[in-house]
Amino acid sequence: MKKLSCIIVDDEPVARKILHEFVEQVPFMDLQGKFENAMKAEAFLKNNTVDIIFLDIEMPRVSGLQLLQKMHIESIVILTTAFPQYALEGYELDIIDYLLKPFAFSRFLKAVQKAKDYSGLKHMVTTALQPSYIFIKSDKRIEKIELNDILYAESVGNYVSVYTADKKVLAYLTMKSLESQLPLNEFIKIHQSYLVNASKIDAIEGNEIKIGNRSLPMSRNYRETVMKIIHQRLLKR
């Protein structure tokens, strides 16, 4: 069973501790970080994606609602707050649930089960709608590339090179725009300049990803996220 990745964003140490303990009691949850303010969470989310965000509202400088308003967040959001007056505004920002502090584990479990059901439905719809190919404009030619043929992509300046087993397609676009068109967790960022097809990885040696006879660097900033995805399919005793 695929675990749902999550982060906790709350300026209260006790609240972070309780949420951490609750998450650890749910087999399908995987905590990837705890942040005491919205700015640190925002910095993390710029380079990482998670399934669920447990988000406090009343925080110094930038509130949870302000974070939702300023960022395009595709994660499922569960608000955790002691202030019931923000409920309507929260739902207008497409949160899935609203936990009013202090809340019991049973209420927490109900919220994450709702998030799990929604995530499963979203995945089914995304899979059904996801095409098996993309078109990329390269010079004066538009190239069709099957997703399964892509080995990796490399960002160089204002261009992205997409590599398959038998060709390289150079396109004037950003890595972020390419990444947005590819299935989440099937194509993973291993470095600021490299995006790889997870199914094409042959081996991981230290800080290098091996794809065929090519070795690609894996940066420290992305290693933890990469290894969590790999461990989901790692056979254990």
Image (tube, rainbow, N blue to C red):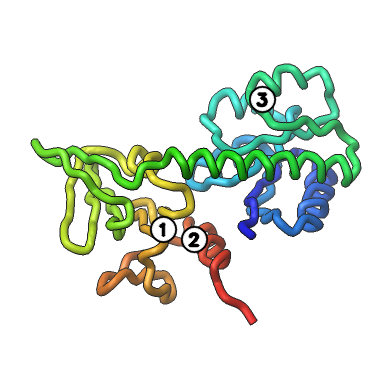
Q: Are marks 2 and 1 in contact (CB under 8 Å)?
A: yes
Any mark on residue 36, and which? none
- Which residue is more in the foreground, 117 or 177? 117
Q: Quadrant of residue 101?
A: top right
- Which residue is more in the foreground, 12 or 64? 64
Position in image of residue 112 (x %, y %): 75, 43
- Examine the rendered structure and indicate whether residue 232 appears above or below residue 150: below
Can you identify the residue that label 2 sits on?
226
Residue located at (23% from left, 58% from top): 164
Can you identify the residue that label 1 sits on?
190
- Which residue is more in the foreground, 126 or 137? 126
The earlier-in-sequence mark between 2 and 1 is 1
Which dot, 2 or 3, sits closer to the camera? 2
The earlier-in-sequence mark between 1 and 3 is 3
The Cα–Cα distance between marks 1 and 3, rounded to whole angstroms, is: 30 Å
Q: Quadrant of residue 150?
A: bottom left
The local secondary structure at tag 3 comes to helix
The local secondary structure at tag 2 comes to helix
Q: Characterize the local packing of mark 1: few (<14), some (14-19) or many (20 or more) Cα atoms within 10 angstroms.
A: many
In the picture, measured across the screen, residue 72 lies left or right of residue 102, that is left
Q: Amino acid at mark 2?
A: Val
Q: Quadrant of residue 209?
A: bottom left
Q: Characterize the local packing of mark 2: few (<14), some (14-19) or many (20 or more) Cα atoms within 10 angstroms.
A: some
Can you identify the residue that label 3 sits on?
65
Position in image of residue 7 (x %, y %): 66, 46
Position in image of residue 165 (x %, y %): 22, 63
Residue 61 is at least partly visible in this image: no
Q: Amino acid at mark 1?
A: Ile
Q: Amino acid at mark 3?
A: Leu
Q: Are marks 2 and 3 in contact (CB under 8 Å)?
A: no
The earlier-in-sequence mark between 2 and 3 is 3
Name the image quarter holding the N terminus.
bottom right
